[in-house]
Amino acid sequence: MILTRQSNSITIKIKTMNTQSKIAVLGMMVLSFAFSGNAAAQMSKEKTVIVGGAPMYPSKNIIENAVNSKDHKTLVAAVKAAGLVETLQGAGPFTVLAPTDEAFAKLPKGTVENLVKPENKATLTKILTYHVLAGKYNAKQIWAAVKAGNGKAMMKTVEGEDLTFWTKGKDLYIRDSKGNNAKVTIADVNQSNGVIHVIDTVLMP
């Protein structure tokens, strides 16, 4: 079978094929175009949030979306180094507090380079899982928890230690065990297996 493209149409030249084979090939092509068209149409209808210059699709999982954000290259590289890709592609649901590249850049020089070394995998994993909550918690739920806690809400991370959520004006903040504060800059980036909240500071257990 030879395919040649002319303008916007595809001319199909089929040689030495019987009628059944021709019908089967044409049927498969029609189905292929139909499925790809339906998938594109479905994605175009989704309510997306732009993160790092890319739309984050609710039908995609955390990893599938994160790799497209130009602001989260360091985080994605760290997740890969820690061997957490498969976990964050799982069913979850997870709430991920995602530091930007600028957030990682605030760390002392050489910190990231050292953390991604194989011998420091355990430490890196501890830090990354400190940015993950088991379950899906949107901003409205967290705000409600803060209000119910008279100004703060403690939430346990996958790493095992707590994070403290608090608010100031219209902004949501997170305090780590070292007393560092991270601001949520983009909230409620929904995923098929949870939600991402973008933060401006790396949290430390």
Image: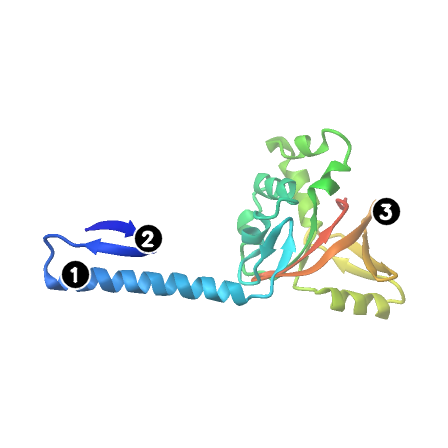
Residue that numbered label 1 is attached to: 22
Q: Where is residue 37 in the image (x, y as percent from the top left)?
A: 40, 63
Name the residue that disc number 3 marks.
Answer: 179
Residue at x 88% of width, y 61% of height: 169
**Of the image marks 2 and 1, the number of the one nearer the N terminus:** 2
Q: How far from the left and from the top, in percent, is residue 189?
A: 65, 59
Helix, strand or loop for disc 2: loop
Indicate the amino acid at tag 1. Answer: Lys
Give the alpha-carbon distance from disc 2 to disc 1, as whole Å: 23 Å
Identify the residue shown where x is 80% and y is 52%: 183
The image quadrant that residue 8 belongs to is bottom left
Q: In this view, does 133 lie above or below 38?
A: above
Q: Dot 3, how many residues are within 10 Å of its Cα: few (below 14), some (14-19), or many (20+)?
A: few
2 vs 1, front mark: 2
Label 3 or label 2, whichever comes before in sequence order: 2
On the question of residue 72 being in view, the answer is yes
Amino acid type at circle 2 is: Ser
| Side (left or right) of 20 relative to 85 | left
Dot in front, 3 or 2? 2
Q: In this view, does 205 lie above or below 170?
A: above
Q: How is the image coloured?
A: rainbow
* In this picture, residue 46 sits left or right of residue 141: left
| 116 w.r.t. 35: above or below | above
Label 3, secondary structure: give it: loop
Query: Which residue does the numbered mark 2 point to in the structure image?
Result: 7
- Tell me: 33 left or right of 197: left
Task: Tell me the quadrant of the picture where the C terminus can be found.
Answer: top right
How far, Cα to Cα, is label 1 from label 3? 69 Å
> How many numbered marks does the figure carry?
3
Q: Residues within 10 Å of mark 2 (few under 14, many from 20)?
A: few
| Vertical order, 119 against 191 (above or below) | above
Q: Earlier in the sequence, mark 1 or mark 3?
A: 1
